[in-house]
Amino acid sequence: MSRDARWKALLELLVERGRLEVEQAAAELEVSAATIRRDFDQLAEQQMLVRTRGGAVVHGVSYELPLRYKTARHASEKQRIAKAVADLVAPGEAVGLTGGTTTTEVARALALRPDLASGSPALTVVTNALNIAGELAVRPQFKIVLTGGVARPQSYELVGPLADGVLSQITMDVAVLGVVAFDVTHGAAAHDEAEAAINRLMCERAERVIVAADSSKLGRRAFARICAAESVDTLVTDAAVDEETVRRFTEAGVGVVAV
């Protein structure tokens, strides 16, 4: 197992359990305790966990994995979701994309659509995500609008009043939200309140709202609310979503696409 794969596995175990002991992690990953101690020390230096006597705990109550360590989680589901979301976008529309791994896949799926290979512009993409803007900026047929703001290293998203200023001056046909949780009662949510505020404003400036989320994020709640379920027009998720969850969202007025 490579170091990056091992680090990703350690961080995911920490997210699930909140605490890991050295011996326990060594046994689960089938490596030596010395290797795990070294991994814990190096991850602690990057402020991605807190070292304890004999183990490690998650870094703070609102802990979230940096984007580069989230990318491989539910990868095939995210790619299917992304293609389905991209198919809901019409040529010439103005599309808002929040940050996140699923919305990054949506951006890639839009870039691959043959009917969006040309135009003036083929799409207008509004985003507060530095990585999405960077990937799409090489597509001359896309008009890219990047909000201002202060960058969050965990998600590459720009947040704060500078981003508010740009979004308050424009309107969009559709906003695509990447979320960490989506629940009928508690709505769509993020870990960080600054990200949630920008995402909320993006929803308010869009004619319709799509939540792109794999089924592991459904029926959950997170610290910072983005919007109510009733504000979402369409949920695009994977085929593992259970029938009861689909029924509850449908009754709340949310169209569900499971792929």
Image (cartoon, rainbow, N blue to C red):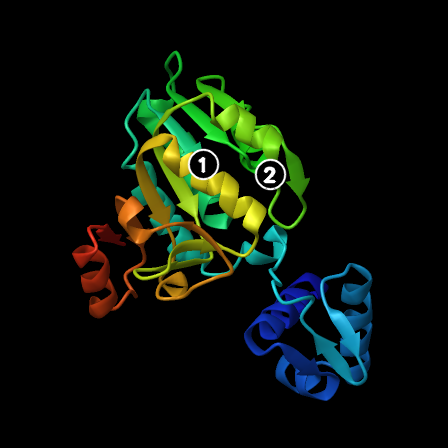
Residue displayed at 43% across by 31% down: 111
Q: Give the percent coordinates (x, y) of residue 102.
A: 45, 48
Residue at 26% x, 44% y: name it: 233
Quarter the C terminus occupies: bottom left
Would residue 99 be visible to someone looking at this image? no
Screen quadrant of the N terminus: bottom right
Q: Earlier along the polypeptide chain: callout 2 or callout 1? A: 2
**Residue 37 badge:** none
Vertical placement of residue 162 versus 52, above or below:
above
Cα distance between the residues tagged 2 and 1:
11 Å
Amino acid type at mark 2: Val
Q: Is residue 180 above or below residue 96?
A: below
Indicate the quadrant where residue 115 lies: top left
Query: Can you say whether 5 is above or below 152 in the image?
Result: below
Residue 187 lies, in percent from the top left, at 36, 56
Residue identifier under label 2 = 159
Question: Percent from the top left, x then y, of residue 170?
Answer: 43, 22
* Vertical relation: 219 (above or below) 147: below
In this view, the residue in front, 174 or 121, is: 174
In the foreground, 75 or 168: 168
Instruction: Residue 22: name its quadrant.
Output: bottom right
Residue 14, percent from left and from top = 62, 73
Q: Secondary structure at mark 1?
A: helix
Look at the image and tell me whether residue 160 can be seen. yes
Could you tell me which residue is drawn at 79 percent across and 66 percent down? 44
What's the amino acid at mark 1? Leu
Q: Residues within 10 Å of mark 2 (few under 14, many from 20)?
A: many
In the image, taking residue 89 as reference, residue 166 lies left or right, namely: right
Q: Nearer the viewer, residue 66 or 79?
A: 66
Q: Which residue is mark 1?
A: 201
Q: Residue furthest top?
A: 120
